[in-house]
Amino acid sequence: MAGWRRRVSRWWLDDLFGPRHEVRFALRIGARLAWLRFRLWLRRPRGMGLRRHWPKPVALALVGIFVPLGIATILSLLFPQEARGVVAAFHRLFTDAQAPRLEWREAAQILLLLIGVPSAFLLWLFRDLNVNATLDNQRKDVNLKEFQEIQMRAAGAIDEKFPAAARETLQIAALHQMRAFLRGEYGKSFQRPAFELLRARLVASAEATGSSIVGNWLQDWRERFRRLEGRDVTRAVIEMKREIAGARRKLRPCAIAAAEQTILSEEWEAVLRGGLPLAGSAFDRIQLGRKTVLSGASFVDCRFRLARLRYVHLERAELSGAYMEGAYLRGAHLEQAAFFYAYLEYASFVGANLDRALLQGASAAGARFTSASLRFATLSDADLRGVSFSNADLRGADFRDAELAGASLRGARLEGAKLADQDASLVGNCTGATFDAATEFAFDWSSLPESECEAARQPWIAKGMKRV
């Protein structure tokens, strides 16, 4: 039974809506994005204005119903004969067309009951809304003064007469107070300044903890790496991995930076999906979990160095020029994500899904795509030297003009992949990798005679590849 379900699931995801069919795959990803956004919409608080006003109208409506009923009950007990007369008058009004007209007192009572109470309710509601608007304007002035004070403390402008530990504690408390402003609970006018303060603090914290040193070292490393060939490439990749791993261990502890990371991790929806300008922001060492939905978000030129983004939803995300060196994206959903000219050195995409992702021109030396799915991904012109594609699904992937020196393709599936202009002697371990007749090992593959195609395959077969 389990095998039957597995076959149906494979047919549904690989053949019917798989990345082989671009339009249907885009439809599948679009449907997933719509579902994820709907779930986010359900979790988002709505109708705050209505929630603020509904208790009073409901209370007034209940009063308008139960008070007249209570008074009518008391009067009917105290004056039973008169009560019967009023009931008879109402009965004549609605049933006997030939009955005499009601007296003015009876008509006034009816008008008061049917018109006066609703009119009073509408007038009260209008007055309540107007008073609340006035109070909101008054609160803005109070909130502005409060925000300015919190902002100063969150930025670290605290009196030097306090001990260093007390100043640090006050700054952390102020940063957490900024969360309400980040969420927009005090209005949109405070949300952008609160975000800009947090963004500036994240840059300062990267300097304080030492995570920015990784970026500075990698800039020099890339300049040297471009000129290397042969075994020097492998040594340089090992050096880079060792340097990044060492930098992670040498990060300086900082309580303020830890508080900022906590705020960023818990308020990710307000910060990363709040319509704020994120381009160029520093999110180094951010930690986000599997419930984080950032599908379709734009993170152009943002920094995610040493970040932990396990199982994060980043379908169709714009990550062009992003700095993700040493990031950990195990199991992340990155279908149709764009990594144009991004920096992915030593990033871990173990088990991630990058079907139809665009990594053109990306610098991914030493990155790990072990067991990842990159079906029909575009990796042309990318620097993939020393990359691990062990057991990865690379069916239909485009490697034309990519740098694959020292890359491991052990156990990878390369059916239908485009490996034209690649030198098999430069590629690393290819043991157990598979290819088929559609795998292109040269340009104009479809027009080449079978003898030339077989000659082009031989160097790869000698490296351990198998035809399937």
Image: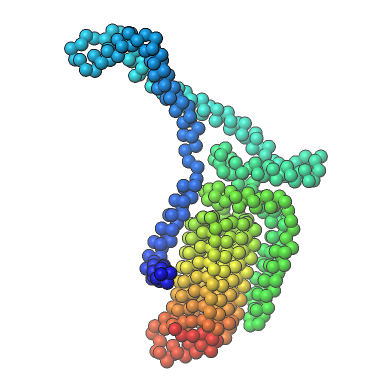
- Front residue of 339/69: it is 69
Residue 37: x and y, percent? Answer: 46, 52
Q: Quadrant of the C terminus?
A: bottom left
Q: Residue at x 49, y 37 (%)?
A: 48
Q: Is residue 175 above or below residue 312?
A: above
> Is 368 situated left or right of 120 in this image?
right
Q: Residue furthest bottom?
A: 451
Question: Looking at the picture, how far across and down is residue 427, in whole percent?
Answer: 57, 82
Where residue 30 appears, x then y in whole percent?
Answer: 42, 59
In this figure, what is the number of numbered marks?
0
Q: Is residue 444 in view from this perspective? A: no
- Where is residue 68, by image quadrant? top left
Please give the name of the residue rendered at 58% of the width and 31% of the height, measured from the top-left corner.
Answer: 139
Q: Is residue 211 visible?
A: yes
Q: Position of residue 44 (x, y in %)?
A: 50, 45
Q: Nearer the viewer, residue 168 or 231?
A: 168
Residue at x 40% of width, y 89% of height: 450
Which one is in front, 75 or 229?
Answer: 75
Q: Does 156 appear above or below 303?
A: above
Question: Where 316 sits versus 122, above or below?
Answer: below
Tell me the colour scheme of the image. rainbow
Q: Residue at point 67% right, 54% down? A: 203
Left or right: 159, with 47 as reference point: right
From the image, which quarter does the N terminus lie in?
bottom left
